[in-house]
Image (spheres, rainbow, N blue to C red):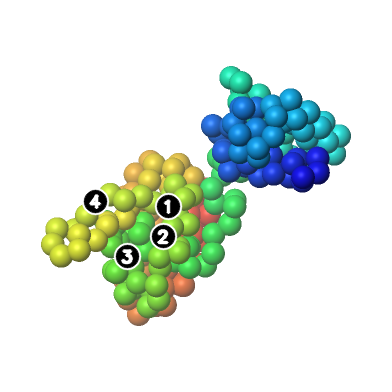
Amino acid sequence: MTKNEMKAIVEGLLFVAGDEGMTYEQIAEVIEVEVDTVKDVMSDLQASMEDTVRGLQIVEVGGSFRFQTRADHAPFIKKLATSPLHSGLSQAALETLAIVAYKQPITRAEIDEIRGVKSERALQSLTSKLLIKEVGRVAGTGRPILYGTTPQFLDHFGLKHLDELPPLPEDIEDDPIEDEADLFFKNMEEGL
């Protein structure tokens, strides 16, 4: 096995190990080489990552090595982490968010029925962006999950309470769901 192959393997191992990282000894055991060889490979890998100014670096924490973002990139990472809607929401996610906001608590089946299409991916996206969450379960067969909005949803739209949501028109049942979502977000933008 060449040194470049070992560097690639170590890089993959550290990626999979995540925050726990790996010690020299653990890496040596996995790739079946001497610890001194791993130290040499790790030193080269760290140097090459520094020389090419990459977004990740290998750091040692408590005797284990792991990937970490560069400290000078922290403002960008913070911006991404604190701004869930800026990472983009699909039309399906916007529609689903409007339905959950106005009809909560609501099950996925009820959302699907209102939209006329499946909403599983939109719900996953909204949950991962911390805009909606599981607020309970329906009693009975299957015990489906009930969804509702989160404090982050309120914070993002500048609301103190859900009763500050813009009112829906009386004939909303006749309008397509896209109009409901558009109305919701248009009114929210005007209110900000």
Q: Residue furthest left?
A: 140
Q: Amino acid at mark 4?
A: Gly
Q: Earlier in the sequence, mark 2 or mark 3?
A: 3
Characterize the local packing of mark 1: few (<14), some (14-19) or many (20 or more) Cα atoms within 10 angstroms: some
Q: Which residue position is annotated with label 4?
A: 136
State the residue in front, 28 or 142. 28
Q: Quadrant of residue 63?
A: top right
Q: Earlier in the sequence, mark 1 or mark 4?
A: 1
Say above or below: 98 vs 23.
below
Query: Mark 2 touching mark 3, by CB under 8 A?
Result: yes
Q: Is residue 28 left or right of residue 122?
A: right
Q: Which residue position is annotated with label 1?
A: 127
Secondary structure beneath dot 2 equals helix
Q: Which residue position is annotated with label 3?
A: 108
Q: Amino acid at mark 1?
A: Thr
Q: Which residue position is annotated with label 2?
A: 123
Q: Does the image show residue 187?
A: no
The x and y percentages for residue 50 are: 81, 32
Q: Quadrant of residue 140?
A: bottom left
Residue drawn at x 69%, y 39% as measured from the top left: 10
Q: Quadrant of residue 82?
A: top right
Q: CA distance from mark 2 to mark 1?
A: 6 Å
Q: Earlier in the sequence, mark 2 or mark 4?
A: 2
Q: CA distance from mark 2 to mark 3?
A: 8 Å
Query: Mark 2 touching mark 1, by CB under 8 A?
Result: yes
State the residue in front, 64 or 119. 64
